[in-house]
Amino acid sequence: KGGRLLEDAAVCALIDELLPLATLITPNMDEARVLWDREVTSLADMEACARDLSARFGTAVLVKGGHLKGDAADVLCHNDALTWHTAPRTAGVHTHGTGCTFSASIATGLAHGLDLNMAVAQAKQFVSRAIAQHFAWQGSGAGIVHALNHLQQTGA
């Protein structure tokens, strides 16, 4: 969570030119608010947003609800169907980098031939494990997910 990374003209270009070409859009709740032009503050908002953005851009949309309280819940709208992907929240850890890790893991699953729903499900499991095995920097500041920690534990 931080400041805006794109100026208004760049957001317009993203919306008009890039997003309609995507296989999947993965906004967090703050990004979804910019794309949807409405607040996203609940599970019901996430569903409505995912449906509306999917129809608007003609692509699948995964609205990530990591900023809500309770379980980490994300909703996928694909081919007019909604699928929830949830995992227990790991309390008290830094989660910097989870969105990028999640998106990269989904892309990897798709590249390996998984269907979109299975790619999202496996990516959710992968990121949940990475959060549970996070790495906190010495001192203050944001920690990072430890996405490959399981490789160290198995000796790979």
Image (spheres, grey):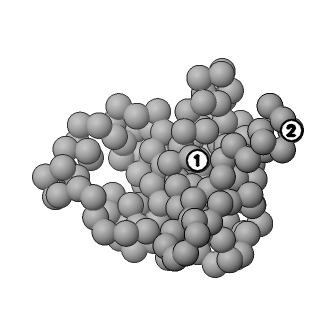
**Residue 112 horizontal side relative to residue 54, left or right:** right
Q: Quadrant of the N terminus?
A: bottom left
Q: CA distance from mark 2 to mark 1?
A: 22 Å
Towards the viewer: 80 or 139: 139
The count of marks equals 2
Residue plotted at (57% across, 65% down): 137
Residue 102's tag is 1
Above/below status of 141 relative to 112: below
Residue 110 x, y percent position in the rendering: 60, 28
- Please name the amino acid that badge 1 sits on: Phe
Quarter of the image where one finds residue 116: top right
* Residue 154 at least partly seen: yes
Circle 1 — which element? Answer: helix
Task: Kindly report which numbered mark, 2 or 1, lies closer to the viewer in this rendering.
Answer: 2
Residue placed under numbered mark 2 in the picture: 154
User: Which quadrant of the rendered structure holds the C terminus?
Assistant: top right
